[in-house]
Image: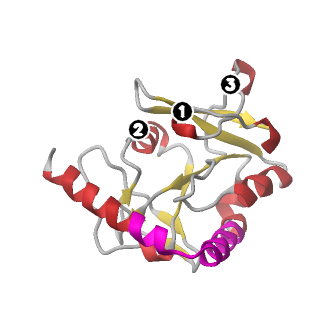
Amino acid sequence: MSSVQAEKKALRSKMMQIRRAMSAEQKAAADAAITALVMQQPEFSAAKKVFAYVSMPHEVGTQALLQGILDAGKTLGLPVCSPQTHTLTFYRLDSLRELHGGMYRIPVPPVSEDRLLTPDAETLVLVPMLAIDREGWRLGAGGGYYDRFLAAYGDTVQVLGICYAENCVTAVPHGQYDKPILCCITEQKREEHNG
């Protein structure tokens, strides 16, 4: 394991502890605030497609946000993981009732050619993270899925990171394949990063 990987692993453990320490009430309030702030952003208003994610217990909750995207009349895309290549492909979800079990126990949309979505300039991608620093370096879950996606499409799409304020840190270790995120939404505010 490289020193960067070891540092990431240690920080990941620390950030997970912080998240586990949040009470259900704190998490629900923070999730609601993040949902409201995301939907107030100019990138959200301008987007025709929003690529989001179905949250796991340790992540910023997205249930209300997913419904809000659908209610706003936008095309909602959700990721399907390919473990062989560690890549993400996004498919259209028309209703939360369509979700079913997928890789890593993460609910996924129906997968079919007619639901496959192509990222473009009118696409907003909401990126989950465990931590982010002042320069926009993000700490993910460790699979590299979003790093690969952003390497391929980061210059095409609009990107907003989603993170709890408590997980904004001084420095996130990063390697050559990591991509900084220039804007992050927390429950407190929109944060711009230098990159």
Question: At which x and y percent is residue 13?
Answer: 33, 61
What residue is pinned by disc 2? 148
Category of crowding for the residue at label 3, using alpha-carbon neighbours closer than 10 angstroms: few (below 14), some (14–19), many (at least 20): some
Q: How far apart are the two marked residues, 3 and 1, measured between alpha carbons?
A: 13 Å
In-image side of 165 versus 114 (left or right): left
Q: 10 Å neighbourhood of mark 2: few (<14), some, or many (≥20)? A: some
Q: Earlier in the sequence, mark 2 or mark 1?
A: 1
Up-down relation of residue 152 to residue 184 (above or below): above
In the image, taking residue 33 as reference, residue 21 lies left or right, namely: left
The amino acid marked with disc number 1 is Met
Residue found 79% across the figure and 44% down from its top: 96
Q: Is the magenta stretch mostly helix, strand or loop?
A: helix
Residue, disc 1: 103
Q: Say if the magenta span includes residue 93.
A: no
Q: Tell me which label, 3 or 1, sits earlier in the chain.
A: 1
Which residue corresponds to mark 3? Answer: 111
Name the residue rendered at 75%, 60% in the picture. Answer: 64
Q: Which colour scheme is used?
A: secondary structure
Helix, strand or loop for disc 2: helix
Between residue 91 and residue 10, name the one nearer to us: 10
Residue 114 appears at what percent x and percent y? 75, 21
Q: Distance between the residues labelled 2 and 1?
A: 18 Å
